[in-house]
Image (tube, rainbow, N blue to C red):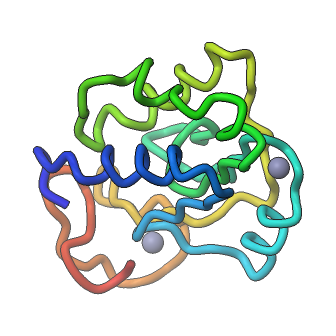
């Protein structure tokens, strides 16, 4: 995805409005063996699986998140109303989280966390020992891992 690409916004919005439970797994996330099983069995309206971001554990991000049909059914126009204008992926995590919290739904956190293959300050956030493949200016791998 390019930095100015709005397709992620439109993809999320269309899944949301479609109204069926969906799970997002971004391309730089490495799932645990039970992650999808646990998310798909959970009946909470909004679930996230934390992962390491820039110096902190991200609990509100979109990298690995489930949106339940119950949530979508109650608030089918939440994205359209709270985020009427498309935004780039840089902004989408925080704005989607804020929109959901605005209707008093908090993320249900799942453990263990998942691995994030993203380079911050020359180190991959996953913390495991693998070669560093070329990254772009944001620290995203341009090929190889993910
Ligand atoms: Zn859950
Ligand atoms: Zn890694």
Q: What residue do we see at 80% from left, 52% from top? A: 110
Q: What residue do we see at 71% from left, 58% from top? A: 113
What is the x, y in percent for residue 44? 85, 44
Q: Which of 30 and 12 is in front in this view?
A: 12
Q: What residue do we see at 29% from left, 38% from top? A: 90
Residue 87 placement, left or right of 64:
left
Q: Which of 140 and 49 is in front in this view?
A: 49
Q: Which of 97 and 77 is in front in this view?
A: 77
Query: In the picture, which quadrant includes the C terminus?
Result: bottom left
- Which of the 4 image quadrants contains residue 11? bottom left
Residue 11 placement, left or right of 141:
right
As drawn, 132 above or below 80: below
As drawn, 145 above or below 57: below
What is the x, y in percent for residue 55? 49, 39
What is the x, y in percent for residue 66? 67, 53
As drawn, 84 above or below 52: above
As drawn, 18 above or below 9: below
What is the x, y in percent for residue 58? 57, 40
Q: What residue do we see at 37% from left, 24% from top? A: 83
How many numbered discs sit on the rendered protein?
0
Q: Which of 42 and 142 is in front in this view?
A: 42
Query: In the picture, which quadrant includes the N terminus?
Result: bottom left
């Amino acid at each position: 995805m390019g930095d100015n690409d709005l397709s992620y916004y439109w993809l999320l919005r269309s899944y949301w409005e479609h109204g069926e439970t969906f799970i997002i797994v971004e391309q730089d996330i490495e799932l645990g063996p039970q992650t999808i099983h646990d998310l798909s069995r959970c009946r909470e309206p909004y679930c996230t699986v934390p992962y390491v971001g820039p110096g902190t554990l991200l609990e509100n991000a979109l990298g690995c998140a489930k949106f339940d049909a119950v949530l979508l059914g109650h608030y089918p126009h939440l994205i359209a109303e709270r985020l009427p204008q498309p935004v780039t992926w840089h902004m989408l995590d925080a704005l989607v989280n804020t929109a959901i919290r605005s209707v008093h739904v908090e993320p249900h956190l799942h453990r263990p966390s998942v691995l994030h293959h993203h380079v911050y300050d020359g180190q991959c956030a996953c913390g495991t020992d693998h070669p560093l493949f070329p990254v772009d200016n944001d620290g995203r791998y341009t090929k190889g891992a993910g």
